Image (tube, helix red, strand yellow):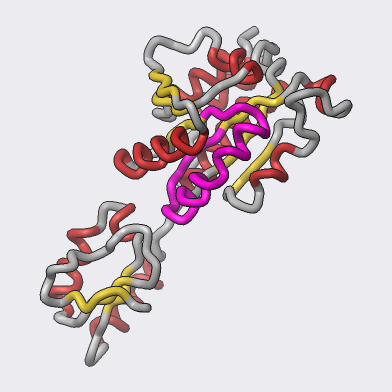
Amino acid sequence: MPSVRRVSHELLERQGLTTVFGNPGSNELPFLAELPDGFRYVLGLHEGAVVGMADGYAQATGRPVLVNLHAASGSGNAMGALTNAVASRTPLVVVAGQQVRPAIGPEANLASVDAPALMKPLVGWAAEPACAGDVPRALAQAVFEARLQRRPTYLSVPYDDWSAEVDDNALALLDRRVLRAAVPGGEQRRWLVEQVASARRPALVLGGDIDSAGRFDDAVRLAERLGGPVWAAPSQFRLPFPNRHPLFRGVLP
């Protein structure tokens, strides 16, 4: 029977989350045991720096990045940098250690009775699996939600879970594919094209997701075809249009 750790490592590898940024403690060591050779662990001495590095790396690559933090204390230290990651819509997958399951209720040292509640005001999704066998599925959901929402997610894992065995059904997670559509359907597209084409004085107000999605050049082509002015929406985490382009009018207040 495979272990939770082995299935989770393979899941992360298949999802491309092989660069890990972290500042681990005793609760995280079981996750790091037998880490495959293809993984790279980038160690930071403070959680703020760890999340900051992961934030930049995820924005540069355009992919979710794994962050490994030490229980509730390390998660709390990361809050400031995590706020920036939320504002930047960065897909971080934060996995934090938790005390062994029998020690959570008695609130032993390094235990957090409701670990997800600490992070829920910030992250797009937070959970602690109800049992060891649910860890791989919860980890897969954390990765999916980070991609879907373009926002950090948080998973608290009791450290005795990693060595537990899972049944063969857990291996099905490795081949699961979840697809999503974030574009209008055919009818909506036609209506949108008609509205834009019939506009007498079209103008564009663009958000930072234009650049995050790699549509910077497409935005320029659209603006030039319409011939209308372009503004950036207020308080953007990325500039969605070249600020020296003659059609650019600046950032809205």
- The residue under the point 77% across, 23% down is 109
Q: Residue furthest right?
A: 106
Q: Using the image, determine if residue 127 lies above or below residue 191.
A: above
Asked if residue 150 can be seen in this view, the reply is no
Describe residue 91's horizontal placement relative to residue 6 as left or right: left
Describe residue 154's horizontal placement relative to residue 56 as left or right: right
Asked if residue 135 can be seen in this view, the reply is yes
- The residue under the point 30% across, 41% down is 60
Quarter holding residue 98: top right
Nearer to us in this view, 94 or 135: 94
Q: Position of residue 26 (x, y in %)?
A: 64, 16
- The residue under the point 23% across, 90% down is 201
Q: Using the image, determine if residue 203 lies above or below residue 185.
A: below
Check residue 49 for magenta coloring. Answer: no
Nearer to us in this view, 212 or 46: 46
Nearer to us in this view, 171 or 25: 25
Describe residue 226's horizontal placement relative to residue 253 as left or right: left
Q: Position of residue 214 (x, y in %)?
A: 26, 52
Q: Position of residue 101 (x, y in %)?
A: 79, 22
Magenta residues?
68-94
Query: How many marks overall?
Result: 0
Q: Using the image, determine if residue 94 lies above or below residue 27.
A: below
Check residue 75 for magenta coloring. Answer: yes
Q: Position of residue 138 (x, y in %)?
A: 63, 33
Q: Using the image, determine if residue 244 lies above or below residue 227.
A: above
Q: Quadrant of the C terminus?
A: bottom left
- The residue under the point 50% across, 24% down is 11
Q: Quadrant of the N terminus?
A: top right
